[in-house]
Image: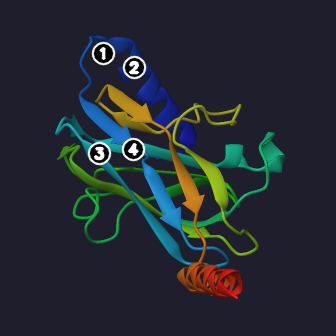
Amino acid sequence: MSRTIALLILGSVALASPRGSSWAAVIDAGAHNLQPNMPGQKIDFFVTGGEKIIAVVFSVAIDGGGPAYGGILGPSITNLDLVSLGHIFSPNHGTVYNDYSDPQLWESNTITAVGTIPATGLLATITVDTTGFGPGEHTLDLKGQPLTDYPGDTQLLFADTLITNGSITIVPEPSSVALAAIGLMGLTVWGCRRRKS
């Protein structure tokens, strides 16, 4: 399924489906802690609601997609997985198309091979590389993407979807936290001994 076909299908469904106060599916990007200076870290995205769907366009950006898209430099996305074992599209999917795979912006889509699947479970997994980045906060967006020639937002075909953006926090390495704690204890003991003398 090409991007153009996906766009036409999703657009026609969006126009035809009634909008109510309840959502058929919910995707919350969540808050994730990652280690500094480390490739190969996984972030899972889950969908709830159970509505029957036939396709997904999954779009994810870190720090606004990076400088090329008006964002800031941040950790890079090295893979986006929609169909491996455990994902809801795993047993029933067609070809996966990677529409964008820039360092901080990735978009892929797939459609079911036959029929529909329920929108409940593991939807996607990204692999993130934090090499060159120490402790700090980064945005993790599934909607409001900087793409101009495509919808940009994560979408499920045949389900009104509520999407909430998330965040990535790069946390200090446990060893550096332990060293800092030991150093603080040492200073405290030294200060107490000095006061006594």
Distance Cα–Cα, label 3 vs label 2: 19 Å
* Nearer-N-terminus badge (4/2): 2
Q: Quadrant of residue 168?
A: bottom right
Marks 3/4 in contact by CB < 8 Å: the verdict is: no
Residue that carries the numbered disc 2 in the rendered image: 14
Distance Cα–Cα, label 4 vs label 1: 16 Å
SS at mark 2 in the image: helix
* Nearer-N-terminus badge (3/1): 1
Tell me the quadrant of the picture where the C terminus can be found.
Answer: bottom right
Residue at the location (36% across, 29% down)? 162
> Could you tell me if residue 113 is visible in this image?
no
Asked if residue 20 is positioned above or below residue 61 in the image, the reply reads above
Marks 2/1 in contact by CB < 8 Å: the verdict is: yes
Distance Cα–Cα, label 3 vs label 4: 11 Å
Q: Which mark is residue 17?
A: 1
Distance Cα–Cα, label 3 vs label 1: 19 Å
Mark 4: which amino acid?
Val
The answer to whether 26 appears left or right of 166 in the picture is left
SS at mark 4 in the image: strand
Frontmost residue, 184 versus 116: 184
Mark 1: which amino acid?
Ser
Residue that carries the numbered disc 3 in the rendered image: 47
Residue that carries the numbered disc 4 in the rendered image: 56
